[in-house]
Amino acid sequence: MYDIRRLILLRDLAEHTTMTAVSELHGITTSAVSQQLRILEDEVGAVLTRRQGRVLRLTHAGRVLVDHTSRILAALEEAESAVTATGAAVTGVLTVATFRTAQLPLALPAVARLRAEHSGLRVRLVDLMPVDSVPAVRQQDVDLAITYSYSFRSRDLPLGLSSEFLFSDPLVLLAPAPLRERARQFGLNAMRDVEWIAARDGAPSIASVVFACREAGFAPRIEHRAGSFAGMAEMVEHGLGVAIVPEMAVCERHRALIACTITGGSRQVGVTYRQASLERPAIAAAIRALRSIAQPQRLAS
């Protein structure tokens, strides 16, 4: 019978493509990773990887084994969930990942509710963007994650994961006083000649700015960069330009900067979890808490 720990190393190599990345992920040396994979090849009796430039790619046999590994891990977690579900109490440790702007309105109230209702449950909160939290759920580093995807982008989850929609977070235009009325009267197209404020290149929110402006018939002239939505709002407040941000990210002090909502633009906020873990009482309780807390925002959207 194959060693499940070696199968996991192969699965992670398939995703990260280098021994170094896998060794860092598991906190072991690259030589230990290499040795374990060689043992696995001996057990299987087939070559599982081939070097392609600086990275390792799976052979056909390796891909078949990784596909089965995902199902094996899901079956093991289903078994664990089923056994746990035979107990009446919600206990154990639950790790929840959340992105920054969902902490105050969603994650923290959910954690407080779970702690109050289930004294035997320890809840841990981790600050992670969806680009990191979804792989963390898949790797079982966290139990579930509060995530988002932009309405104009399709989203494919890795095999074995599911996501439940919680509510829609509209995108809004922030503008300094002289430009707000212009935006309200003539829409986003009236902002084609102004300076724009956006996140750094590579940030997910950049796509929302480019998409919205393209729909309005122009490309934004991005002059200023900020590392957070709060930083963007500060720049708008000081007259540096305009910005598109999720409404949930706008604090009370900056609400007056909102000029208009972006037609067809929103973040779809949801909770992502492993399908095999759904029977775990702690997972089910967390999803119920998130649904309940999100309900008013869902109705408002």
Image (tube, rainbow, N blue to C red):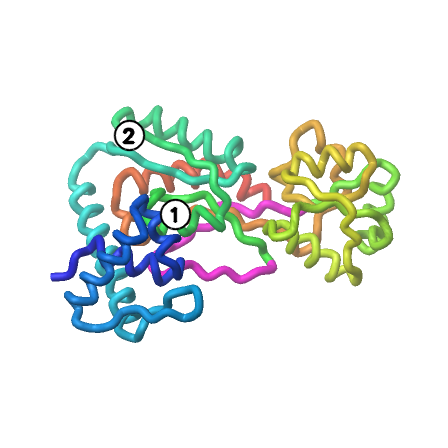
| Three-letter code for the amino acid on which mark 2 is drawn | Leu
The residue lying at 78 percent from left, 33 percent from top is 237
Left or right of 90: which side holds 195? right
Question: Percent position (x, y) of residue 45?
Answer: 17, 72
Q: Specify which label sits upstream in the sequence, 1 or 2.
A: 2
The residue lying furthest to the front in this view is 31
Q: Quadrant of the N terminus?
A: bottom left
| Residue that mark 1 sits on | 136
Between 199 and 18, the one lying in front of the other is 18
Is 169 part of what is drawn in magenta?
yes
Question: Percent position (x, y) of residue 41?
Answer: 20, 66
The residue lying at 39 percent from left, 53 percent from top is 21
Between 33 and 293, the one lying in front of the other is 33
Above or below for 255 versus 202:
above
The residue lying at 23 percent from left, 57 percent from top is 35
Question: Percent position (x, y) of residue 285?
Answer: 33, 38
User: In the image, which disc is placed on residue 121?
Assistant: 2
**Bounds of the magenta span?**
152-171
What separation in Å lies between label 1 and label 2 (alpha carbons)? 21 Å
The residue lying furthest to the bottom in this view is 60
